[in-house]
Image (cartoon, rainbow, N blue to C red):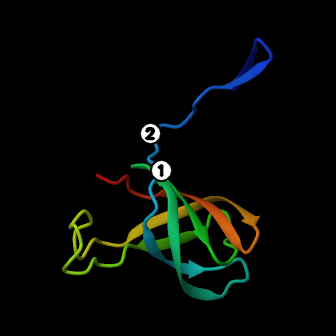
Amino acid sequence: MHSKTGGTTVYEERRRSARIRLQVPLFVRGNDAYGEQFVDLAKTLDISSLGAFITCPRPLTVNEVVTLTIPAPSITSSGLVPAGMAPIQARVKRQQEAGDVHLVGVEFLKPLG
């Protein structure tokens, strides 16, 4: 939903959960748009308790369920991400090509937290 005010278009935020701009490497596992099983290294661009916006090197299919796994941090890491964090199941909600990567919006099957 949007409205015009003084020549500027104002968009109403429709998200159910606040997003955080955060780049975190993760592995994406599932079937790509061609039906091939894959595991790729990707990264988040932003994340919320309900989903994430990620970059992926291959096209995915809308409504496909993928598994996201955050690699265990090294011993010298800050400890912000717990070691052994369980994989996250997510449904692809949208995707678009952006140069040599695909921008993918996913919704977590179970909210984080």
Number of numbered tags placed on the structure image: 2
**Mark 1 closeness class: few <14, some 14–19, many ≥20 residues within 10 Å:** few
Quote the CA–CA distance across marks 1 and 2: 10 Å
In this rendering, position of residue 53 left or right of residue 17? right
Task: Identify the amino acid type marked 1.
Answer: Arg
Q: Which residue is at 71% across, 77% downward?
A: 33
Q: Which residue is at 57% across, 87% downward?
A: 38
In this rendering, position of residue 82 left or right of residue 87? left
Which part of the image, by quadrant, shows the N terminus? top right
Task: Residue at the far top: name it.
Answer: 6
In front of the other: 42 or 77: 77
In front of the other: 1 or 34: 1
Q: Which residue is at 54% across, 62% downward?
A: 91
> SS of the residue at dot 1?
loop
Residue 53 position, x and y percent, is 55, 57
Q: Are marks 1 and 2 in contact (CB under 8 Å)?
A: no
Does 17 appear above or below 113? above
**Mark 2 closeness class: few <14, some 14–19, many ≥20 residues within 10 Å:** few
Residue hosting label 1: 21
Residue 93 position, x and y percent, is 62, 56
In front of the other: 17 or 11: 11
Does 5 appear above or below 91? above
> SS of the residue at dot 2?
loop
The answer to which image quadrant residue 64 occupies is bottom right
Task: Identify the amino acid type marked 2.
Answer: Ala
Task: Residue at the far right: name it.
Answer: 7
Q: Which residue is at 75% across, 20% downward?
A: 8
In front of the other: 1 or 25: 25
Task: Residue at the far front: name it.
Answer: 76
The answer to which image quadrant residue 77 occupies is bottom left
Residue hosting label 2: 18
Residue 92 position, x and y percent, is 59, 62
